[in-house]
Amino acid sequence: MPYRFDRRVTDLVVTLAVLVALSACGGKKRPPVLATAPGGERAPAEGADRAPAQPLDEGPDVRAVQGEGAEGSDLAGSALGSGEGSPLADVHFEYDSVALTDEARATLEKHALWLQGRRDVRVTVEGHCDERGTVEYNLALGEQRARATREYLVSLGVAAERLRVVSFGKERPVELGRDEAAWARNRRAHFAVSR
């Protein structure tokens, strides 16, 4: 009987060592992404079942984009200016806040008008944060920012089922600087538009 106990302990130690070794061999992994479907339930971050998008008409607070952006793909993480990967401009937040500023509300009112004129368009509202804070904290803060943005658009008459929420936390900065100007640009809700 002692032999079986020793054998079990040995097997357990070997199994744990293999699991630790395998977890360390994965290379650089992307951080988790929180995604929420319109009903509030969790949904996968990748939209593999999306239909190909068509170019969007210009409207209030809208810029025409070329290439990937015109098809609803997002260019988040690039060094492009606010709203370049989307026909809808980003809205920005104060440090450690989910409250919409007056400027953000004005921008969202224009977005709501644009969206009401294009009922076939769907939007993923992405919550982003600056680099300060832990990954977990910023994922939660990014989700709260995206939800606040979504709720305001819904209050303006945009159908809730057209708006999906996802948080990237601090993992997809639009500007890589380490000063207040860069941090302010990264504290945002970004809009990935598709059909």
Image (tube, rainbow, N blue to C red):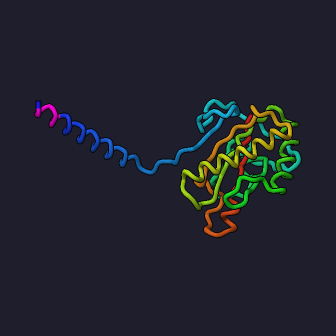
Residue at (61% x, 68% y) in the render: 178
Q: Pick whichever, 95 or 85, lies toward us.
A: 95
Task: Name the image quarter holding the C terminus.
Answer: top right
Kindly indicate the quadrant of the structure image that contains residue 52. Answer: top right
Measured from the top left, where is residue 184 in percent x and y? 70, 63
Q: Is residue 58 left or right of residue 194?
A: right
Would you identify the image quadrant in which residue 46 lies? top right
Left-right relation of 67 to 159: left
**Residue most toward the front?**
1
Quadrant of the rendered image containing residue 82:
bottom right
Q: Please name whichever residue, 171 or 27, is drawn nearer the observer in this view of the structure.
A: 171
The span shown in magenta is: 2-7
Q: Is residue 30 above or below residue 94?
A: above
**Position above or below: 81 against 162:** below
Question: At x 68% / y 61%, what residue is drawn?
Answer: 95
- Expressed as whole percent of the image width and height from the top left, the position of residue 90 reads 75, 52
The answer to whether residue 148 is magenta is: no
